[in-house]
């Protein structure tokens, strides 16, 4: 018994940082992830459509139907309680893996506390934690597809999978085109420019052709309206035990599609929307600062001028979605995530010393600042969108409204 207790104590002492950060992740997820009953609320019942809307149920090819089609391979109907538990565990696993990876990286660096606080600041930022709050939204799959595509390009292994991963991203949600295909494409292009490998060149060209075909097919054939949208909705409703929000398929394949443009421009014409956009931009200033500081100091490593420019701006291309959709917090969240993935592989490809690149002189001051920002992010919580604002943003809006009106 004493030996077992001694082993447990030694393990905890050896991995106490990992245990601590996993506990923080767990409690943060408990705070952020909505309860089971929220699956039937207006917006999460909207998200659930993705998991029952398939090519089979539609009777033809449709946009955003890949997730539901894959779900159909495993089950004919979804039990919402099992669904909730599976996604809860999925988020816990993903965030835990990222947290432990941050600790392991920090332990192998001379400035380990700076790396640790830098990593946790990004992990607990409103953008990254938003995916847990936006429970089960397929955006998490877009991120995984983008990361693995970049990883395969970086390792120069399994490159033949890259076109398929990109097409899968487009079929999950066409927003993948704006948010992640630019960083994948420019990273791939730069790898070719650096190491003129015939295999990379061939796969890159194939990827371009395949992705263009996928985009054409999605927008030409995948978004055509259904004559009887009510029949489609009843078909997918029978596959899950929670009432669905029919707005999702009506916006995609019904009469409400024509209203999207006016809704988007209508929201952009209000001061509260611009207050929200400014708030989102300001809250990520620390991450923007780190990104541009490293990029501008190290971009000389890239040989070609045009690639340099595209490399810097690629992660921000997704922000054009602000003009076509009202999920502003979601767009910032995806853009920041693309920014972090892009920077991660840039640093790895050129083996960049982040501390030297950031030109850090006062270690203790930087650690204190990063720690305070991390704590601030934990307090602020995940992103909102036009429907679910930060609590802080609501208070700020009320404050401004008081003086205006």
Image (spheres, rainbow, N blue to C red):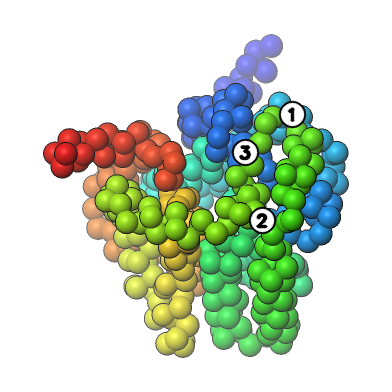
332 over 121 or under it: above or below: below
Rounded to the nearest angstrom, the CA distance separating label 3 from label 1 is 13 Å
Residue at 26 percent of width and 39 percent of height? 397
Mark 3 and mark 2 lie on one chain; the one further toward the N terminus is 3
10 Å neighbourhood of mark 1: few (<14), some, or many (≥20)? few
Query: Between residues 311 and 238, which one lies in front from this camera angle?
Result: 238
Contact between labelled residues 1 and 3, with CB atoms less than 8 Å apart: no
Label disc, if present, on residue 107 of the rendered structure = none
Q: Mark 3 = which residue?
A: 245
Q: Secondary structure at mark 1?
A: loop
Label disc, if present, on residue 241 of the rendered structure = 1
Mark 2 and mark 1 lie on one chain; the one further toward the N terminus is 1
Q: Secondary structure at mark 3?
A: loop
254 over 2 or under it: above or below: below
Rounded to the nearest angstrom, the CA distance separating label 2 from label 1 is 23 Å
10 Å neighbourhood of mark 3: few (<14), some, or many (≥20)? many
Label disc, if present, on residue 253 of the rendered structure = 2
């Amino acid at each position: 018994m004493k030996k077992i207790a001694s082993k447990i104590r030694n393990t905890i002492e050896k991995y106490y940082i990992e245990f601590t950060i996993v506990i923080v992740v767990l409690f943060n997820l408990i705070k952020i992830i909505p309860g089971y009953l929220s699956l039937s609320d207006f917006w999460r019942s909207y998200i659930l459509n993705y998991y029952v809307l398939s090519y089979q149920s539609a009777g033809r090819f449709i946009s955003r139907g890949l997730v539901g089609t894959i779900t159909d391979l495993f089950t004919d109907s979804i039990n919402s309680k099992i669904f909730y538990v599976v996604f809860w565990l999925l988020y816990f696993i993903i965030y835990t893996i990222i947290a432990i990876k941050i600790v392991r990286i920090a332990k192998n660096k001379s400035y380990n506390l700076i790396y640790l606080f830098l990593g946790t600041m990004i992990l607990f930022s409103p953008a990254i934690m938003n995916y847990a709050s936006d429970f089960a939204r397929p955006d998490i799959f877009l991120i995984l597809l983008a990361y693995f595509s970049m990883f395969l390009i970086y390792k120069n292994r399994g490159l033949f999978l890259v076109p398929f991963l990109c097409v899968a991203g487009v079929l999950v949600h066409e927003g993948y085109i704006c948010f992640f295909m630019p960083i994948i494409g420019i990273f791939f292009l730069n790898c070719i420019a650096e190491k003129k490998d015939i295999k990379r060149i061939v796969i890159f060209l194939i990827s371009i052709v395949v992705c263009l075909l996928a985009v054409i097919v999605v927008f030409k054939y995948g978004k055509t309206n259904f004559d009887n949208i009510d029949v489609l909705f009843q078909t997918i409703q029978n596959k899950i035990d929670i009432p669905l929000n029919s707005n999702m398929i009506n916006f995609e394949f019904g009469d409400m599609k024509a209203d999207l443009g006016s809704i988007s421009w209508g929201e952009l014409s209000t001061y509260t929307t611009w207050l929200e956009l400014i708030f989102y931009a300001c809250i990520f200033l620390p991450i923007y600062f780190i990104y541009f500081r490293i990029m501008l100091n190290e971009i000389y490593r890239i040989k070609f001028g045009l690639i340099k420019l595209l490399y810097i701006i690629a992660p921000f291309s997704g922000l054009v979605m602000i003009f076509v959709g009202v999920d502003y917090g979601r767009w910032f969240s995806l853009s920041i995530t693309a920014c972090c993935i892009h920077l991660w592989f840039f640093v790895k490809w050129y083996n960049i010393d982040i501390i030297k690149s950031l030109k850090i002189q006062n270690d203790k001051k930087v650690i204190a600042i990063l720690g305070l920002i991390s704590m601030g992010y934990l307090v602020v919580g995940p992103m909102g969108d036009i429907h679910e604002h930060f609590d802080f943003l609501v208070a700020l809006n009320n404050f401004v409204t008081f003086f205006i009106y």
